């Protein structure tokens, strides 16, 4: 038996034991795990440093190094996420519907865990703790496969979590990490249908596409983020500039960062000088269409690739439009159905944008950076689903459950 199959088999073997844990036991185990992460921060940071040294030797760009970097503060935030999940309502056993048919049978629709969840992800080692917290609280066992660039960090975090579970009297195999950087092991993981109930990829567009195209296990697709901000002719520019700065520059290497700006041509004279100065101050490289480029000194000509690109860096495409409908059409053509925003004081225009932009999260007058499980009150998140089946948007506890119909009778037979 291979290493990958053994880990998946072990997770499958404990899935019902994890499902049967009561809420109090799960919450206590999560709080103990949070304490353990903080207590072992030194060991985790030492492992993370090994990953950072290797990343820089490999020429990783700094925006991606930031995603990989752990600090005491970020470990504390990971621990806080576990505690927040412990404080959230337990979805397992929630009754979604309850009715009695004319035959006398009673039918209840009740939330239950998937069983075993597989997660393949890149770079960000905090995902290891987030994924454990959400899958465990929702009654699932999990098998994790992180990227090669975070292998030391992920291994250290997983060891702390497993040791903490054992100390809490919970099966350590509720969380398993495939400690391999071999792509053959990733490929094998995607075939483990006998043991794994659902697969969730979290990372680049290339990773997600690879999982969707090769998995024999059902996939919940989390998407890359070509997020747009549309500045309407009725926008309050005092709101627009801070929103754009925040969405583009607060953290560039994340999926909810803005990558594309769409501007109504009626406000070009008033808006563009302020926008250009703000982007210059924050060292953002602009890729602009022909109409906007004269207002943006030093901007490169925007290509079709620019309009469709998730830069994950200090780059932004700029498109000029003549109406909200033209903005909606442009966004729906090039976006990744993640998060898109309109800045306007016109309620009718805002409502049209909310209805017709086909994204998981659509904003009015707020930064796309709010697309996040913490900000939505879900505690940690497993990812942002950009598909439409089962789950869409930030995926918290409820999105990591399915349901059963529980039917109770008293001798009824069907005629």
Image: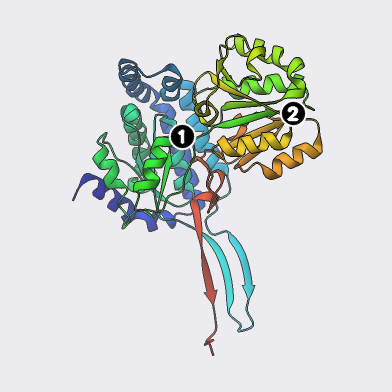
> According to the image, label 1 marks what residue?
34
Under circle 2, the secondary element is loop
Work out whether residue 304 or residue 389 is closer to the camera in this orientation and state it: 304
Q: Where residue 377 sits in the image (x, y, percent)? A: 61, 39
Compared with residue 349, is residue 243 higher up or lower down, i.e. above or below?
Answer: above
Nearer to us of marks 1 and 2 is: 2
Q: Where residue 254 sits in the image (x, y, percent)? A: 51, 28
Instruction: Specify whether residue 363 is in view.
Output: no
> According to the image, label 2 marks what residue?
232
Q: Residues within 10 Å of mark 2 (few under 14, many from 20)?
A: many
- Residue drawn where x is 34% and y is 45% of the image: 172
Q: Where residue 202 sits in the image (x, y, percent)? A: 44, 38
- Residue drawn where x is 62% and y is 22% of the image: 246
Compared across the picture, whether 304 is left or right of 341 comes to left
Compared with residue 216, is residue 233 higher up or lower down, i.e. above or below?
Answer: above
Compared across the picture, whether 291 is left or right of 177 comes to right
- Residue drawn where x is 53% and y is 43% of the image: 386
Under circle 1, the secondary element is helix
Q: Earlier in the sequence, mark 1 or mark 2?
A: 1
Instruction: Specify whether residue 253 is in view.
Output: yes
Q: Residues within 10 Å of mark 1 (few under 14, many from 20)?
A: many
Work out whether residue 42 or residue 45 is closer to the camera in this orientation and state it: 45
Label total for image: 2
Q: Where residue 54 sits in the image (x, y, percent)? A: 30, 19
Display coloring: rainbow
Distance, label 1 to label 2, CA atoms, is 44 Å
């Amino acid at each position: 038996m291979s290493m990958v199959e053994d880990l998946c088999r072990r997770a499958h073997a404990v899935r019902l034991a994890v499902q049967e844990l009561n809420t109090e036991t799960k919450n206590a185990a999560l709080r103990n795990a949070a304490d353990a992460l903080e207590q072992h921060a030194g060991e985790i940071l030492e492992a993370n440093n090994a990953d950072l040294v290797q990343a820089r030797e490999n020429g990783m760009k700094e925006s991606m190094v930031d995603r990989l970097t752990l600090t005491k503060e970020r470990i504390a935030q990971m621990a806080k996420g576990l505690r927040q999940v412990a404080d959230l309502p337990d979805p397992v056993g929630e009754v979604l519907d309850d009715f009695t048919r004319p035959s006398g049978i009673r039918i209840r629709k009740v939330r239950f865990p998937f069983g075993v969840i597989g997660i393949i992800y890149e770079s960000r080692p905090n995902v290891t703790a987030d994924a454990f917290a959400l899958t465990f609280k929702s009654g699932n066992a999990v098998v994790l496969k992180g990227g090669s660039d975070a292998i030391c960090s992920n291994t250290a975090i997983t060891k702390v979590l497993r040791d903490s579970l054992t100390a809490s009297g919970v099966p350590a195999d509720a969380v398993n990490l495939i400690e391999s950087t071999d792509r053959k092991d990733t490929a094998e993981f995607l075939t483990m249908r006998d043991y794994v109930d659902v697969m969730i990829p979290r990372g680049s567009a290339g990773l997600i596409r690879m999982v969707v195209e090769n998995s024999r296990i059902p996939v919940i697709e989390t998407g890359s983020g070509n997020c747009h901000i549309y500045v309407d002719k009725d926008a309050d520019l005092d709101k627009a500039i801070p929103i754009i700065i925040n969405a583009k520059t607060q953290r560039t290497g994340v999926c909810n960062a803005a990558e594309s700006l769409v501007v109504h041509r009626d406000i070009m004279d008033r808006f563009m000088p302020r926008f250009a100065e703000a982007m210059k101050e924050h060292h953002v490289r602009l890729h602009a269409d022909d109409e906007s480029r004269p207002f943006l000194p030093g901007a490169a000509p925007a290509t079709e690739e620019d309009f469709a690109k998730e830069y994950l860096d200090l780059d932004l495409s700029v498109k000029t439009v003549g109406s909200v409908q033209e903005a909606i059409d442009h966004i729906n053509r090039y976006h990744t159905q993640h998060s898109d925003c309109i800045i306007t004081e016109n309620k009718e225009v805002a409502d049209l944008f909310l209805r017709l932009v086909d994204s998981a999260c659509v904003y009015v007058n707020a930064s796309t950076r709010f697309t996040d499980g913490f900000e939505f009150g879900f505690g940690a998140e497993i990812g942002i689903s950009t598909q439409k089946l089962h789950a869409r948007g930030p995926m918290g506890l409820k999105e990591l459950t399915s349901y059963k119909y529980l039917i109770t009778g008293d001798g009824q037979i069907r005629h």
